[in-house]
Amino acid sequence: MYNSLTNIPICSFISTILIVVFLLSFINLIKFHPCNENMLSNFVSNFFHVDILHLLSNIYGLYVLSRVEKNIGPKKFSLVVFLILFLNTAIETVSNRIFKTSCSIGFSSILYGILAWEIVYGNKDTNYFIIVAVIFDAFSSYYLNRKIAVTSHIIGIITGILLAIIQIKFNLFK
């Protein structure tokens, strides 16, 4: 297992951050509540989780998407994650102000962004079934748990697609 984690240093680092933030929040060493309408609060909310199942499902999703890090390398992957985090935070902040959407907490919007980016930019053999499944999951998860912020998942997908289009248009990563 150690060997496999060294092959995905960015995913391992992000997972560690998610776990540390969760533990510090759980024992009340972090008292910040990330549900304000500003950019910093929306950025920080990506690293908070409401419970252990939420945290573990996001870490598992990150592990599943670690194939992207393996395929493009840690430097490019860290850039993709950073840009998705930045774009997602900006779009979510604007969305919150215009549409008064609910607060979103967790890393899933970033995961949806990475997946959408991979489908549009990184995967030459696009499987349209996967695209439909991702969109279905983004909407259907709300019906399984009404506390899930579907708008966050949709914003993540939009962010990933937007980043892929920007990268293709400006020939980045070449």
Image: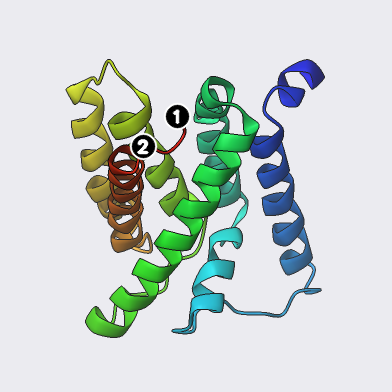
Task: Name the residue tied to disc 1.
Answer: 174
> Does residue 173 lie above or below 3 as drawn?
below
Tell me the amino acid under the disc marked 1: Lys
Secondary structure beneath disc 1?
loop
Which of the numbered marks, if any, corresponds to residue 171?
Answer: 2
Residue 95 disc label = none
Say whether residue 79 is left or right of residue 143. right
**Quick check: 47 left or right of 133?**
right
Find residue 69 and report its image quarter.
top right
Q: Where is residue 60? Give x, y as percent.
A: 56, 34
Q: Where is residue 102 in the image (x, y as percent from the top left)?
A: 35, 75
Dot 2 and dot 1 residues touching (CB under 8 Å): yes
Q: Image point 24% across, 82% down: which residue?
A: 98
| Residue 129 in the image, given as x and y percentages of width and height | 19, 23
- Nearest the viewer among 120 and 50 is 120
Looking at this view, is 32 or 73 the one in front? 73
